[in-house]
Image: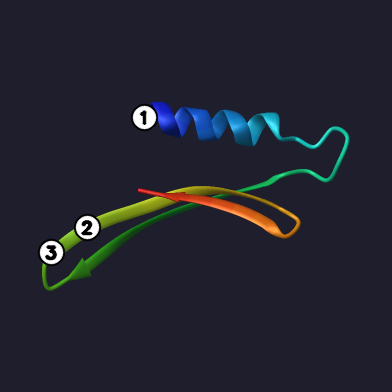
Amino acid sequence: MRNLMLVAGLCLSGCGADTQPVQPAVTLGVGVGASGVNTYGGVGLSQGPVSVFFGF
């Protein structure tokens, strides 16, 4: 939970006051397979050619 709050803070602080804004991304989903139901998700940041994504 602490890491998620850190990433959320980075998303909010990267508003891009002097450059292009940082574009946040959030992915959430549910998968159903032979082993049962599982959930997945992640958050990421993108600015120009650089992207960072953290999955959980």
Which mark is first along the chain, 2 or 1? 1
Residue 5 against residue 33 in the figure, above or below: above
Q: What numbered label is drawn on residue 38?
A: 2
Q: Amino acid at mark 3?
A: Gly
Q: Of discs 1 and 3, which sits in the foreground? A: 1
> Horizontal placement of 34 versus 10: left or right?
left
Residue 43 against residue 31 in the figure, above or below: above
Neighbor class of circle 3 (other Cα within 10 Å; few <14, some 14-19, many 20+) is few
List the residue tagged with mark 1.
1
Give how far apart the Cα atoms at labels 1 and 2 are: 19 Å
Quadrant where the N terminus lies?
top left
Residue 27, percent across and down? 46, 54
Neighbor class of circle 1 (other Cα within 10 Å; few <14, some 14-19, many 20+) is few
Residue located 52% across and 35% down the image? 7
Give how far apart the Cα atoms at labels 1 and 3 are: 25 Å
Give how far apart the Cα atoms at labels 2 and 3 are: 7 Å
> Horizontal placement of 9 versus 38: left or right?
right
Local secondary structure at mark 3: strand
Residue located 62% across and 55% down the image? 51
Q: Of discs 1 and 2, which sits in the foreground? A: 1
Residue 48, percent across and down? 76, 56
